[in-house]
Image: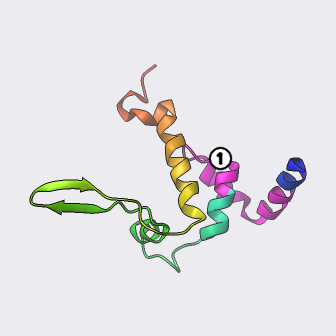
Amino acid sequence: MLAKLGAQIEAMMQPFRAARDLLITIPGIGQLSAAAIISEIGTDVRGYFPDAAHLASWAGLCPGNHESAGRHRPGKRRKGSQHLQPVLVECAWAAAATRATSNPSAAGTS
C-alpha cells in the first residue's frame, strides 16, 4: 500500500519535478516535504504573496513579539495553514539537526 501511494505521489509530481528537485537542495527538505510544500503553495507564489514575509505570515510561522515594561516574552506560533505549517516546522527541525547547518561557521571545516 505504501509503495502504491509513493508511486502515485511520484506520478502526480512529474509536472513539478524541476521545482521539487530545487526544493530538495535546501537542507531539511526531502522528497515528501517538497511534494507537500508544492501542493500547498504551488511553484509560483509571486501572484499570491509579494515577498517571503507575507508567505511566512500566511503559513503562521511569524513569531509573536510580546514586550511589556521592558520584558520580552516569547510568542506562540500563530494560526495558519494547517497543512503547510507542520511540514515547514518539521523541515526546520531537520535542518537544525543537520551538521552543516547547525553551525554555519563550521560548515567549511572538516
Q: Residue at x 62, y 61 (%)?
A: 37
The crowding category of the residue bearing disc 1, from other C-alpha atoms within 10 Å (few below 14, some 14 to 19, many at least 20), is some
Q: Nearer the viewer, residue 11 or 96?
A: 96
Q: Nearer the viewer, residue 17 or 54?
A: 54
Q: Can residue 43 be seen in the rendering of this structure?
A: no
Q: Nearer the viewer, residue 44 or 2?
A: 2
Question: Residue pushed farthest top?
Answer: 110
Q: State left or right for residue 33 relative to residue 95.
A: right
| Residue 67 on the magenta span | no
Q: Residue at x 90, y 53 (%)?
A: 4
Q: Residue at x 77, y 66 (%)?
A: 15
Q: Where is residue 67 shown, x and y percent of the image?
A: 18, 61
| Residue 26 on the magenta span | yes
Q: Where is residue 45 shown, x and y percent of the image?
A: 54, 73
Is residue 43 placed above or below 1 in the rendered structure? below
Is residue 87 placed above or below 82 in the rendered structure? above
**Bounds of the magenta span?**
8-34
- Please, what is the three-letter code of the amino acid marked with disc 1? Gly
Q: Nearer the viewer, residue 3 or 30?
A: 3
Q: Where is residue 19 shown, x and y percent of the image?
A: 65, 60
Report the number of discs.
1
Name the chief secondary structure element in magenta: helix
Q: Residue at x 90, y 50 (%)?
A: 1
Is residue 48 placed above or below 65 in the rendered structure? below
**Residue at the spot of label 1:** 30
SS class of the residue under badge 1?
A: loop
Q: Can residue 100 be seen in the rendering of this structure?
A: yes
